[in-house]
Structure formats: C-alpha cells, structure tokens
Amino acid sequence: MTNKTKPTDHTQFEPNHHQEVPVEDDQLFIAVSGLEHGHIYSMCQGMKAAGATICWVWDEDPEKITAFQKTFPEASHAASLSQILDDEKVQMVASAAVPSERCEIGIKVLDAGKHFFSAKTPFTTIEQLIRAEQKVNETGLLWAVFYSERLQVECAGFAEQLIQKGAIGDVVQVLGTGPHRLNIHQRPDWFFWKEKYGGIVCDIGSHQIEQFLWFAGAKDAKILSSTVMNMSHPDTPEFEAYGDAHLIADNGTIHYFRVDWFTPDGLSNWGDGRTVILGTDGYIELRKYVDIADQSEGERLYLVNHGGERMYNVKGQVGYPYFYRLAHDVLEHTSTAMSQKHTFKAAELCLLAQEQATTIRR
C-alpha cells in the first residue's frame, strides 16, 4: 500500500463509493454452522446484500437457531452439519462457532467441496493453521476470514483510498487500539478458557494485525514483543483482560497495538476502536465506532498532511466491497476479496504473538 509520491499539499480528497455488483439471484447458496458469536449476523447480512441465499442454519443450541431465523427467516433449521454438507446446492458455509472449533468445521466443509467463511479468530493453534493451509492447497477452495474491524468499517476503506492516492506519503507506522466492553455476565463459559478462545492477542488482536499488514502493504512481519495480563478477574485465571504487541513488517513498517476488555459503562459504544496511520507526509486517524463527546456514531476519519487538517464523516460514503467480491470469488473461482496468503498470514502472526507473549502478573 506504500506509494512513493511527492509530498501532498492538499486535503481535498473525497471518498469513492464502491459500486459493487451483487451476484445474480439464485446463483449463490450459503449455510451457517455455529452461532456462538454475533459476528455471524454481520457476515450473513453482508453476503445476503451481495446476492447470496442463506438456505440452512445449524447450531447445537435451538434457541440460537430460533433467534437467527428471526433475522434470516429464509434459513431452514438443519438437523446437523452433515445435512448441510450433503446438500450439493450449498457452495459456502459460514461459521462463528467456538474459536477452537472453527478449524475442524472448516476442514469438514472443504472436504465436502464447499468454501468456508470463518469469523475471526479462525484458529487457536499453529497446528490448526497448518492443517487449514494444507487443505486449501489440496482442494483449491477458499478459507475466508471476517476481519470485521477493517472489512466492515467505512473509514478504513477510505483510509486505503487515501494511502493509494499518496495523501500521507509512505506508511511508516500503524498504531491500533481495540478496547471492548466485557459484559461479563453475558459471556458463555468458553469465553474464559484459553484453550477455547485462544488468548486476547490471538482473538481480538487478530483484527489489529490484519489491518496493519493491509495498510502497510506488507506480506510478512516479525513479532518484536507482546504482553498479556489479567489484573481484574481472579476468579477466571485463564482470561486475559489486556494484551499488546510490537511488530516490524518485511518492508520496514512498524506496528503497535493494544487490545483490552476495560471499556467503561459510560461509553456510548461497545469500544472506542481507533487506528492511526503515520506516513512520511502526514497521518490519518480513524475513529471507527464513536467520536467521544461529539455525539458521533463513528466512521470519522481525520487527515493531516502538508496541505492542512480535515475531518471526514464517511458513513454511507464508501460501502463494504468485501462481501460482494467474496460472493463473486465463490462463483468465479477467483481471489479478489482477500488473498489466501494475506488471510493466513494475519492469523499466523496473531498466533505467534500470543505464543510469545510475556504474562504480567499484578
């Protein structure tokens, strides 16, 4: 994504709305297996907007299925994952199962000749990642991952456009913060078991590493350091409430991110997620979900370069091209939404950062 241009002396850029074309009706059929995380709703809404038909849903909890069908009544209640896999009409299966179970579901999906669409984080161990890579190479099918903090954020899409146009010169560093509200009494038991959720850096840190690679135009990176900590929940010792990491990309771009479960109840949103992209000729700040004390719902982008300062409100101005591209990828056997190498590299780095993390005890 780096763009070697002369210094930019203006801020008069405007967001370009992606004019994506949905696939034709009754051409793309998808199913759902695993409703443990709310991301499955965004995944299905995005694919439905792109022209997909959601024909099946399966989960071990019938109450989750009932709730899902209220939003997607067209989805029939499957008796099992096997019933979905036996349906030759289904071309892709989406899953937001317990994180540690997503890989096994994906293996079964690809073995059945179907593409797989996973919520983040797609894997909780390196061994799972290796198995997935082998299966993708064996079958030639897609293993897509919904890294929502970039793919479903319009100001992130505009930031990509600005970088490509040279608005801040070459990217030097990407700084990310991903605070989340815990809502501890609403969380399932698996949420607090590291074997199940993978650790905070592996889990919500995956968003941060993916967008770093994307904005930096990097193909790989090295973990310089990482830290995890649980200082506030002694009753759940395997839960990590704080995590951070420091990376350097293969092109020299630096990254630091912090993720946590400390969002206070007074915030009007579930988390004040931000990204700052520093360039040789300026910087961009994304206030993704809320612009505090300004009654904003988010989608604010701040640009500062040699031409001055400017704030953009891009809600409804960019769109979410990922889903449309993924829909066409499934039908046309292409890889325009996100390369498989990028998808798996982001997953690999978050696993390595988690594995290498120093645990701070207070």
Image (cartoon, rainbow, N blue to C red):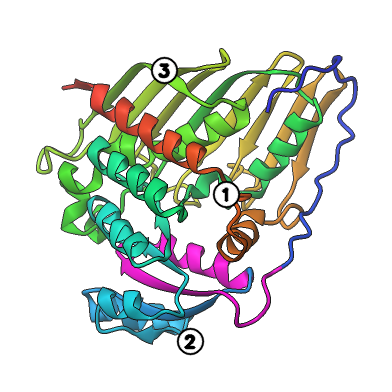
Residue 120 image position (x, y, % from top left): 39, 49
Quadrant location, the C terminus: top left
Q: Secondary structure at mark 3?
A: strand
The tag earlier along the polypeptide, 2 or 3, is 2
User: Which amino acid, mark 3?
Assistant: Lys
Decide which of 210, 133 is in the foreground and name it: 133
Residue 69: quadrant of the picture: bottom left
Separation of disc 1 and disc 2 at Cα? 25 Å
Decide which of 239, 21 is in the foreground and name it: 21
Residue 279 image position (x, y, % from top left): 69, 18
Separation of disc 3 and disc 1 at Cα? 24 Å
The structure residue drawn at horizontal position 77% and vertical position 15%, both measured from the top left corner, is 281
| Residue 110 in sight in this render | yes
Numbered tag placed on residue 151 in the rendering? 1
The structure residue drawn at horizontal position 60% and vertical position 50%, both measured from the top left corner, is 337
User: Which amino acid, mark 2?
Assistant: Glu
Verify CB contact (< 8 Å) between mark 2 and mark 3: no
Residue 243 image position (x, y, % from top left): 32, 29
Separation of disc 2 and disc 3 at Cα? 45 Å
- Please state the total of marks drawn on the protein image: 3
The tag earlier along the polypeptide, 3 or 1, is 1
Tell me, yes or no, whether the highlighted magenta stretch contains residue 55: no
Residue 36 image position (x, y, % from top left): 30, 63
Residue 13: quadrant of the picture: top right
Q: Is residue 191 left or right of residue 172?
A: left
Q: Which residues are magenta?
A: 22-49
Q: Which residue is mark 3?
A: 222
Is 129 drawn above or below residue 330 in the view shown?
A: above
Numbered tag placed on residue 74 in the rendering? 2
The structure residue drawn at horizontal position 53% and vertical position 27%, both measured from the top left corner, is 219
